[in-house]
Image (cartoon, coloured by chain):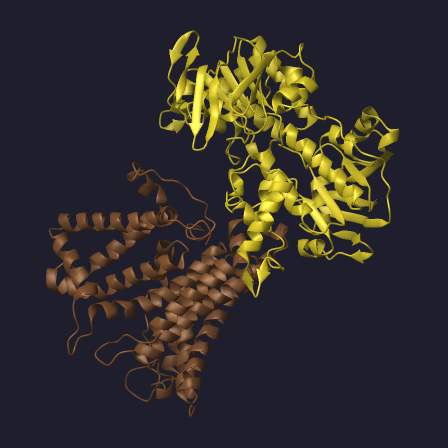
Amino acid sequence: MRNFSFAKLWSGAWPAVASVFLALVVAGLVMVVTGSDPIKAYTSLIEGAFLRPGTDTRPTAFLDTLVSATPYLILALGISLAFTAGLFNIGAEGQLYMGALASVMVGFLVKGLPPIIHLPLSLLAGAVMGALWAGIAGWLKATRGAPEVVTTIMLNYISYSVVNFMVNGPLRHTGTAPRTPDIEPSAVLPNMLPSPERLHWGFVIALLCAVAYYFLVYRSPLGLRIRLVGANKEAARYAGIQVNRTYLITMLISGGLCGLAGGVEILSLYRFMPSEFTTGYGFDSIAVALLGQGNPIGILLAAILFGALANGAGYMQFSSGVSNYIISVLQAFIIVFVAAPGIVRDLFGWIRIKRVAPALPAQGGTK
Amino acid sequence: MRGITKRFPGVLANDNINLDLNKGEIHALLGENGAGKSTLMNILYGLYQPDAGEIFLNGKAVKIHGPRDAIAQGIGMVHQHFMLVPTLTVAENITLGMEEQKGVLLDVERPSAKIKEIAKKYGLEIDPGAYIKDLPVGLQQRVEIVKTLYRDAQVLVLDEPTAVLTPQEVEGLFATLRTLVAQGVSIIFISHKLKEVKAIANRITVLRQGRVVGWTTPAEADEAKLASMMVGRPVLLKVDKTPAKPGGETLSIKSLKVMSDRKSVAVDGVSFAVRAGEIVGIAGVEGNGQTELVEAITGLRAQTEGAIVMESHDLPRESPRAGIAAGMSHIPENRHKFGMVSSYPLTTNLVLSTFDRAPFTKNGLLNDAEIEKNARTLIKEFDVRTPNEFVPIGKLSGGNQQKAVVAREFSRPMKLLVASQPTRGVDVGSIEFIHKRIVEARDKGAAVLLISAELDEIMSLSDRILVMFKGKIVGERETAKTTREDVGLLMMGKV
């Protein structure tokens, strides 16, 4: 990070900050129009997401926000990596599904291993499965030029069916509800704090992923290859970079992260695979990745924001009477403003914007 | 324009500039890249507001707030990069933004009739129904000119209009401009090409570093004088070089066949060799297969038949990587597409093909200190004018971008240099510099393959000339034993 300055940092971050701010304003207007009190709603949202202390039966709000942020963070890192190469991985949800399934399978089928081996093995299975699943799209892109936008969406549908079939069929637990058996205790990703806190070691894994992302993308030659392919693939080819190979590698890593997210989620919170494992995390995380602007710290903050929205929504509805659907409205407006930086720029026209060399972040995000 | 001053952060782009344009004249604005020509014209066109100074039109002071304003006042501009929609027709492009309606439908006939009328009046033959994407560059430019006339432009600004044209198209453009002037249109002709300015202008204003350094006319100044006014010092228009001392064959091309993007045969069974220590120039009118030939040699395009051999090793098809590994350097014809990543800083662009090797990668991580040191060294050695090494390369002037590309390609061990249009869109000072470097590379034993649409460049640099016509090599000449006319005839396919 050469020439570091807060001015530069701000110039990279301000569109995201402004987008969130505008979305809060617009969603507030929606509440006013529909006869609710936005101040009260936001106050209770913040309270529910960050401020409420824990009790004997209820986890601390902020720590639970981190629990919700965990899958967002890992998935958004994966999606963001694809953006960096100019690829749009819409298949994060499917990769998460397949990763979760693989982790659970290793978690309950393999028996008699110590946790120190069994847990990493289960997580690894999730990552490998996610990588292979995304790798199909990457391979089709690299060898046949098939647009990854289409193939990853298709693979999403296939993954839902695969999981459904496995959970209702070969892997079905002998019980009334269609689900897999519980994983072995040795494969459980444990909590960091005693109950009722739910914060688990997955959050630390997610943070490690963010650090690894920084080193991979901004410090390693592979990362520079990925960035150059995303910035100008013809120039990358000219410079001797194997573009198709880079696409494939990028999709493998991107899918690996998404699969890992599935493993982390399932081995910590669920500990079995239900048949209706609809998370939506994979799609929301596209917004998280966009909001994070390709910067791991930005992605971390965006993930915490989305975690907070998810976590605070219930309390907001309970204490202010505003439907928690307003959270979806809010998220949607964030996406609109992030995806259309022109709107934000016009609205904040009076702020002098100096475009700074995107040597570091802000590369992939807007593609 | 009186006393125009425009300041950008850190640069005084225009410093108290005065410019007069008489009715019915072609006034050339001559200057190197970055001299302030484009800024001045963007002020005239309302894209920038001057910090000081005034613009008078027919004796009246006017304020121009934007392009729409400029058009309303009768000022038209043809940008270097055309502002046309390829998938629309000529008529649709011309009327874009001022479409006429017939009821609720678009009126197609009236604009077409008006276009035909303009075409007739000014001798600008054009088919209003043709699609832009099907037109050659010369005709696309004509569409741009008609577009301004359709909006009743009386003052026409042409920004580097010949940069994209072949010699024949330039002749066509000049004929058009003379007709326009005869009809009372006034033209500002922005260029850095001395020959053209001398050929077309009535008067010449020379800009250097944001200031007017002189006025002259083609009758008063010869090319050497114009060049020294422009650059601020005497410039060598001729290349100094000793006779070549060729060694063994470095590159040999064997019955190469390459397809174009449109799947037609672009290179049709071409064979030749380039020896170490010689410069082989490929002359030819653009579009005769040179681009495809270069792309095949450098691995950017797969050949359908034939072999590319470097020092007796066959290069694999379509692998720029293999070429680089074999010691090939390539100054690409299309700098923006291939040569650089505009949004990335000079530091990265100067190690574009070497960043994953030592010393730029150490212990698996990029070594910023070495990458930056490399950039500083090359910037100094190749005289790249930039505030610092972290500036995105896209922000530099064309000449400096090209010098950076040349610097990068010369920074690797080089056995073969493929230089394609190495000085296109580059100012006089930089041309001199790049030419000198190419000759130096030859003298150090590199084989050089030079492809250029500028016959002058081929004649002054090459030791041996091959002429390409319709995908074939139609002739070979020793430079010392031939003339411009001789090569010119070959270029037209007259063997």
| Chain B shade in the render | yellow
Residue A325 x, y percent position in the rendering = 21, 59
* Side of A362 relative to A62 (left or right): right
For the point 59% across and 56% down, the residue is B355
- Work out whether residue B133 or residue B355 is closer to the camera in this orientation and state it: B355
Residue A154 x, y percent position in the rendering = 45, 63
- Work out whether residue B143 or residue B63 is closer to the camera in this orientation and state it: B63
* Side of A323 relative to B410 (left or right): left
Most distant residue in the bottom direction: A112
* Side of A199 relative to B264 (left or right): left
Most distant residue in the right direction: B481
Q: Is B26 situated above or below A231?
A: above
Q: Is A151 situated above or below B53?
A: below
Residue A210 x, y percent position in the rendering = 40, 65
Q: Which chain is represented by brown in the image?
A: A
Residue B416 x, y percent position in the rendering = 76, 48
Q: Quadrant of residue B401?
A: top right
Q: Quadrant of residue B226?
A: top right
Mark yes or no: residue B349 visible: yes
Mark yes or no: residue B119 visible: no
* Side of A98 relative to B342 (left or right): left
Q: Quadrant of the N terminus of chain A?
A: bottom left
Q: Is A364 situated above or below B138?
A: below
